[in-house]
Image (cartoon, rainbow, N blue to C red):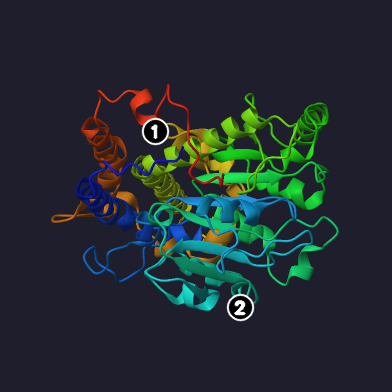
Amino acid sequence: TLRLAAEEKSGDYAVALQRLRKIYHNSIKPMEQAYKYNELRQHEISAYPGRTLGDSATDGEITSKPMVLFLGPWSVGKSSMINYLLGLQDTPYQLYTGAEPTTSEFTVIMHGEKIRSVEGIVMAADSSRSFSPLEKFGQNFLEKLIGIEMPHKLLERVTFVDTPGIIENRKQQERGYPFNDVCQWFIDRADLIFVVFDPTKLDVGLELEMLFRQLKGRESQIRIILNKADSLATQDLMRVYGALFWSLAPLINVTEPPRVYVSSFWPYDYAPNTSRELFKREEISLLEDLNQVIENRLENKIAFIRQHGIRVRIHGLLVDRYVQTFKEKMSFFSDPELVFKEIVDDPDKFYIFKSILAKTNVSKFDLPNRDAYRDFFGINPVTSFKQLSAQCSYMGGCLLEKIEKAITADLPGLLSSINSSKNPTLSSCEATGCGEKPKNRYRRN
């Protein structure tokens, strides 16, 4: 059953979060700004320019709660599942559900002092939230974004995002906003991704195929939900389970398949003559999975900041290499534009990317797309950047040294201190209540 880890000390969490923000602002953000990383990648951390560490209780995504994202075809039970987890069924505040496509907006369910809805334009304008970057998708999208705040214990630890159902016969442009780009934004920031199906919607069309392409690299966060399982007899359920894997197999190119939960996630009793015990155990496993994400939220944030720092460092090294090569190839009679065009059009000729792989902690799988730098330098002239060797000061130190220290020492040290502060004698049975018959407090008896 879902436990909210009440024994966790909020003071320790706040101190660790403060240290994490300090490491980011002092060691990673300076290089991020000096080499305009945010103009290369859209996966930036939304810490806002001009804000100091003490100006606000939050720094966008650094302090945001874990996000659980619900994706899948229309009318498979995504909204019903959120109603069930939050106990909103048959209350005035439940998300609207129905057999027809009902959710046309991206709905963010988050904690608040009282129940109220927040318009998308307000969410994007509020710098205390982590949704400001969504403005780049245009006003048409912001009209399709809505937030719901409510005082709920679970929402103090996690944020749910409900998405419009995938309709395979609808063209992208008919939505009026870049649906796949918006999904990618939420996917990149989600700690747990539930892809929901039901027995009647197992076919894979172009939009769902595109969605699974966007999920590539996030397989560890994906959970497949086969909902409404009590609508089938056991034999039919086994056939549907096999058909689901058959449909998804070409889309998930990993050695280990993602975890699949089979149950009916709503507050009503299971249909008679179905696998009730199996469904109940599956529900409890899913709730424990969700609880694990909540308890590991700080570790996940540290890992995310470190991954971001690695990408910023690689970007800084690449820009430095482009600048160095440009200066080496320039002569008194050279045309700067032609010289740099040759470099940016064929970086392999000048060993731009290969030279970076010789550095410590650089994997070829982390290197950005070469074509991205053609666009990047089209906006930012190479002459506007200094080499890394010139990015040092007596008081502030060197940018490269600071970010390398953060990646190799500061962030791993912070992670180790968090792990060591946890109670090492607590067994898994004490944490999950093994040996006792699990009681699901979400199910109405």
* Residue appearing at x 44%, y 50% in the figure: 66
* 428 over 4 or under it: above or below: above
Residue 340 in the image: x percent, y percent?
Answer: 54, 57
* Residue appearing at x 52%, y 78% in the figure: 121
Neighbourhood count class around disc 2 (C-alpha, 10 Å): few under 14, some 14–19, many 20 upward: some
Residue 317 left/right relative to 252: left
Q: Residue furthest left?
A: 395
Closer to the camera in the image, 441 or 294: 441
Q: Amino acid at mark 1?
A: Asn
Image disc number at residue 361: 1
Q: Can you tell which quarter of the image residue 180 is in?
A: bottom right
Residue 169 in the image: x percent, y percent?
Answer: 86, 59
Earlier residue among tags 2 and 1: 2
Q: Are marks 2 and 1 in contact (CB under 8 Å)?
A: no
Label 2 secondary element: helix
Find disc 2 in the rendering and name its residue. Answer: 139
Residue 244 left/right relative to 286: right
- Asked if residue 299 can be seen in this view, the reply is yes
Closer to the camera in the image, 147 or 324: 147
Q: Amino acid at mark 2?
A: Gln
Q: Quadrant of the C terminus?
A: top right
Residue 81 left/right relative to 362: right
* Residue appearing at x 37%, y 24% in the figure: 429
Question: How many angstroms separate mark 2 from mark 1 (CA)?
Answer: 41 Å
Closer to the camera in the image, 264 or 57: 264
- Asked if residue 373 can be seen in this view, the reply is no
